[in-house]
Structure formats: structure tokens, C-alpha cells
Amino acid sequence: MRLARSISELRSLRASLPEPVGFVPTMGSLHEGHLSLVRCSHQECASTAASIFVNPTQFAPSEDLSAYPRDLDRDLSMLEKAGANLVFAPVSDGEMYPPGYATWVTVSGITERLEGASRPTHFRGVTTVVAKLFSLVRPQRAYFGQKDAQQALVIDRLIADLDFDIELVVAPTVREPDGLAMSSRNTYLSPAERRAAPVLRRALDLAESLWRDGERSAEEIRSRVTALLRAEPLARVDYASVADPGTLEELETISPRALVSLAVRIGKTRLIDNTVLPPGSPLLERRTSCS
């Protein structure tokens, strides 16, 4: 596995990679969810590239960028074992955003709901850095996890609108044994908060159960899911959404599909999770997981 710390090193090392190249962008603090994407790419592509960059432009002023966990040596070891051939870990923020940087990539519409409504500057930072990484790495496939479903939908629109010749692969959410979606933010939870956090998975299980029992009222599912979340004393609900999986507009009736998305604060830690109805449906209607 080769490591690039600068854009010039990345371009040089990328030129020697056998095609096709799969790409897994990350912010480090890796867990099994990230590694499953790397292994998926390793199975499907001749080469696998990954990035480790805690992107400052997707953090709001109220969010503690400096507190985000970082352990480059650990992450590099994990990526090598999972099958990565090339890792781009910029030596500084200035490598990606040099003095005078003034260009931004903005996706309208779906970025203004859910996470975009709660974190208004977030997606501009995500779409800008991903567009830069796509341009630098030039992958044929890009791998994202369904836990960040809105992000995957935004990247899908970015790829289509900017004519990137990239296939987007959205892999299933990887979970802890008790159902909690794996996330770097889980390390922020106290023991009591960690015990409370699986309430998100139970809420999604409820939505799936209601759908299987014939419930098609989006408002009824939203209401029942929200009530279950609020019954957990440590949980504060940011949103519980039942939306069209293409536009993220809230639905009145589920026909034929819906994306159920949650954002919940457990103590000071904000967690997100989602499921698609009917249960087991892919987020995107084309191939969306490792075959």
C-alpha cells in the first residue's frame, strides 16, 4: 500500500494503479463500516484507493472540529489489511484548501432538507471536497455507506450533474450486535448513553413492522416512531422523517417506497440512521451493494 501526503504525490501514484479503480473517501477514525467498503472495492476492482481527510468545510462553527478523533497510523494499518492499494491523507488542510481558495460545489434541493436543514453549511463542504477528490483520484467506482443515506443521494446527484464517469455503490449499514449503526461518533457516548443509543434501531424496526402490517400513512409511522424515541429519557429527537427516497420531500402516503431517516441526540452526541421501505429495498434503484 502506498501513501500520498500531497496532491502531487497522489497524481504520481495514481498513474500507476491498474484499472478499474475503486475509491472510498473517509474522515478517518475507521471502523468496520469503512472497512466493509474497502473490502467491497477490493473484490470488485483491480485497485482500491481511499482518502483520510477531516474536512473542515463540512463542520459548522458550533461543531468541534478539533475534537474529531484522529489516529493516522491505526487507520493506515486497517486500510492495508482491508486491501487498499493507495491512501491519500493530505498533510494539512491547506493542501486541499490553499490560501485564496474560493470555489465551491453546491447541490440544490435535496441538500436543504433533513441534515441540510439542521446543518446548513454541511453539504456544501461535502460536495466540494468529494468533487475535488473525484477529480484527483479519477475512480471508476465510488463506495459509500447507507448510514449516511442523504449524503449518498447528494453524491449521486453530483455525479450525474457534473458528468463524472463514476458508478456509485451504496453498501448496507454495518451495525453493532445490539443494532446501533457503526459510527466514529459512537466513541463520544458515555456507558449510559451507549446503552440508550440502540433506540434508533428499535424505532426503525417499528417503522418496518408497521409497513409489514399494512400501514401506508407516512404521518402515522412518523408519529409512532417519534413517540418511541421520545420514550427514551436520554434521547432528544432532531427529526424523524418519512420521505420520498429520491427528493427527500416528506410523504403523506407511502407509494411505492419511502426513506425513514432519524437524527437523535443521545446526551451531546448526534446520531443518524435510516431504513428504506419496503424493508430490504435498495436506497438507489440500480445496483447499490457489493455483489
Image (spheres, rainbow, N blue to C red):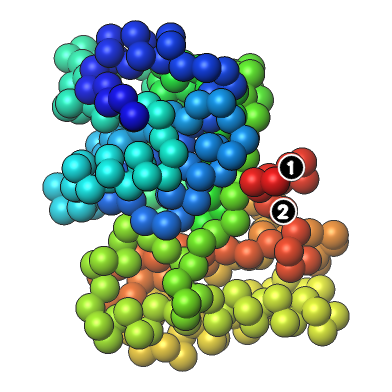
Q: Which one is in front, 120 or 70?
A: 70
> CA separation, marks 1 and 2?
8 Å
Q: Which amino acid does label 1 sit on?
A: Arg
Quarter of image, res 176? bottom left
Q: Is residue 280 visible?
A: yes
Q: Where is residue 235 in the image (x, y as percent from the top left)?
A: 38, 80
Q: In this view, does 233 lie above or below 112?
A: below
Q: Name the residue under label 1.
A: 287
Say which of 148 and 35 sits in front.
35
Q: Residue at x 14, y 47 (%)?
A: 66
The percent coordinates of residue 136 (x first, y second) are 41, 16
The answer to which quarter of the image holds residue 198 is bottom left
> Looking at the picture, does residue 178 appear above or below residue 16?
below
Q: Are marks 1 and 2 in contact (CB under 8 Å)?
A: yes
Q: Name the residue rendered at 30%, 81% in the picture.
A: 193
Q: Residue placed at 28% from the left, 51% from the top? A: 29
**Tag 2 secondary structure:** loop
Q: Can residue 149 be seen in this view?
A: no
Q: Which amino acid does label 2 sit on?
A: Pro
Percent across and percent down for residue 291 are 70, 46
Instruction: Name the residue located 39 percent from the left edge and 78 percent from the top edge.
Output: 197
The first of marks 1 and 2 along the sequence is: 2
In this rendering, the answer to whether 234 lies above or below 26 is below
The answer to whether residue 216 is above or below residue 79 is: below
- Residue 216 falls in image quadrant: bottom right
User: For mark 2, what is the residue?
Assistant: 282
